[in-house]
Image: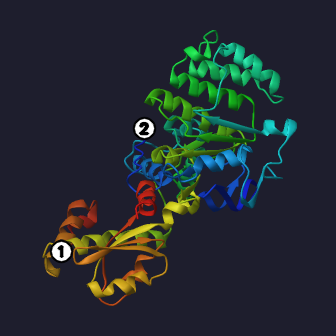
């Protein structure tokens, strides 16, 4: 797997690796049962510290994205399952950014809400899509 | 936590020049520890003190469990030093150098030494003086690692190597680190190399440790926050815990340090625009540029 490591971003390298695996799983590029490289292999391949890879894999394991059965390797389990408070935190951060930007651009509350409704409707799937 | 190196208020003066002005540092066993700093910050002096080439003017330290400068006789083999200036024997062939060092090194690992030759594609029959600069650096690393030291000190690793040689050099270091408990302390001003290769980092500035610790901890703690605020808020911003630097910017300030953005927002008249995690490069500049 190819990874973009950006040392200018201020995002720790272990998190960059974890995020890219997470996104590949969400996008279906990696599916349950796929094998990820061993720690040493990936560290040497990316020329990063082995502990950085250990940390990335630990984070992915905590999020339920991968499993590391002892001595048998590293395998994809499925999309991340985040604890409720972390899901809320991430949503709040994203929403706060969106609202701040909308206000800076001069939109009023009804218009901003209208956008949220439209985006929800556009991305909704299944029987709920008709509800507004 | 086991420490390979522990320094307490270490000082080194050369006449009236103070090279190290109280260095306190803890290097855990098995870590790849990056020592950052501009030229003249004291990095090389520190490595040479650890090697016992210099004596401290003050303070104390231990190295592999022994007081500084007291690793003697066969125990010296637990320690290795690689520097671009460190002499290899120019007139020997690569194979000849290997045979020579093998006789001196009680811990010499011949199989590993052979593997490094192949990895770096070093010609065994060529004389050291006829090798390219990159090959000499790789040979120096190969010789040091094959001696199986517990602590490896490297002054400017991969300096002057082209991208291909540099990558192979780093890869060997990382692969070795993943499979051994060897501690590597490397001094460098190559920020990208240190960020990638090291799990711990210390920034030497003016002969002191400005900041040190596990890489993620050091990076995670340091933030730069852009705030909108009246000029009168300057003093209040300086008073917030962890704030190291406040620079005016338009109708506001850039605040840098180990700071909680919420604590800035809590000040009256101050509104938060954006908070950034510092990259290692930004962190470096924030300490060095004053």
Separation of residues labelled 2 and 1 (CA atoms): 37 Å
View extreme (bottom): residue: B268
Q: Chain of mark 2?
A: A
Mark 2 or 1: the one toward you: 1
Is residue B114 positioned above or below B218 on the image?
A: above
A27 on left or right of A34: left
Q: Residue A87: which quarter of the image?
A: bottom left
Residue at point 77%, 26% (across, down)? B109
Dots 2, 1 in contact, CB < 8 A: no
Question: Of helix, strand and loop, which one carries label 2?
Answer: loop
- Which dot marks residue A2? 2
Question: Of helix, strand and loop, which one carries label 1?
Answer: helix
View extreme (top): residue: B125
Q: Residue B83: which quarter of the image?
A: top right
Query: Percent position (x, y) of residue B207?
Result: 58, 59
B104 on left or right of B143: right
Query: Between B281 and B81, which is closer to the camera in this rendering?
Result: B81
Residue B174 seen anywhere in this rendered image of the structure: yes
Q: Which residue is mark 1?
A: A104
Query: Between A59 and B86, which is closer to the camera in this rendering?
Result: B86
Residue at point 58%, 52% (across, down)? B42
Is residue B123 positioned above or below B142 on the image?
A: above
For the image shown, how many numbered marks are present on the structure? 2
Query: Percent position (x, y) of residue B101?
Result: 76, 23
């Amino acid at each position: 797997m190819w990874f973009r490591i950006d040392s200018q971003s201020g995002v720790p390298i272990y998190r960059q690796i974890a995020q890219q695996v997470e996104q590949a799983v969400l996008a279906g590029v990696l599916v349950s049962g796929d094998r990820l490289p061993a720690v040493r292999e990936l560290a040497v391949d990316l020329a990063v510290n082995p502990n950085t890879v250990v940390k990335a894999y630990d984070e992915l394991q905590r999020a339920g994205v991968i499993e590391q059965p002892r001595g048998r390797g590293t395998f994809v389990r499925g999309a991340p399952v985040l604890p409720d408070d972390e899901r809320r935190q991430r949503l709040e951060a994203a929403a706060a950014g969106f609202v701040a930007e909308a206000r800076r651009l001069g939109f009023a509350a009804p218009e901003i809400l209208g956008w949220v409704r439209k985006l929800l409707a556009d991305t909704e799937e299944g029987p709920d899509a008709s509800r507004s | 936590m086991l420490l390979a190196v522990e320094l307490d208020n270490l000082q080194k003066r050369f006449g009236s020049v103070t090279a190290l002005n109280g260095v306190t540092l803890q290097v855990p066993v098995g870590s790849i520890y990056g020592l950052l700093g501009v030229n003249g910050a004291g990095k090389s002096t520190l490595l040479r003190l650890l090697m016992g080439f210099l004596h401290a003017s003050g303070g104390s330290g231990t190295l592999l469990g022994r007081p500084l400068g007291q690793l003697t006789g066969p125990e010296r083999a637990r320690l290795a030093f690689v520097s671009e200036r460190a002499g290899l024997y120019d007139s020997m062939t690569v194979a000849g150098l290997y045979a020579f060092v093998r006789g001196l090194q009680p811990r010499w690992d011949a199989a590993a030494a052979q593997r490094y030759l192949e990895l770096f594609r070093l010609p065994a029959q060529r004389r050291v003086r006829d090798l390219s600069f990159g090959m000499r650096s790789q040979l120096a690393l190969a010789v040091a690692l094959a001696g199986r030291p517990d602590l490896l000190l490297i002054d400017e690793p991969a300096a002057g190597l082209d991208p291909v040689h540099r990558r192979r050099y780093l890869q060997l270091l990382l692969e070795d680190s993943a499979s051994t408990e060897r501690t590597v302390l490397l001094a460098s001003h190559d920020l990208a190399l240190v960020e990638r290769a090291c799990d711990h980092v210390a920034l030497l500035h003016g002969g002191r440790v400005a900041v040190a610790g596990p890489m993620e901890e050091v990076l995670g703690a340091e933030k730069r926050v852009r705030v909108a605020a009246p000029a009168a808020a300057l003093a209040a911003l300086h008073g917030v815990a962890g704030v190291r630097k406040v620079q005016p910017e338009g109708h506001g300030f850039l605040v840098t340090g180990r700071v909680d953005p919420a604590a800035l927002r809590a000040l009256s008249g101050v509104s938060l625009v954006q908070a950034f995690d510092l990259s290692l490069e930004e962190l470096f500049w924030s300490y060095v540029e004053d």
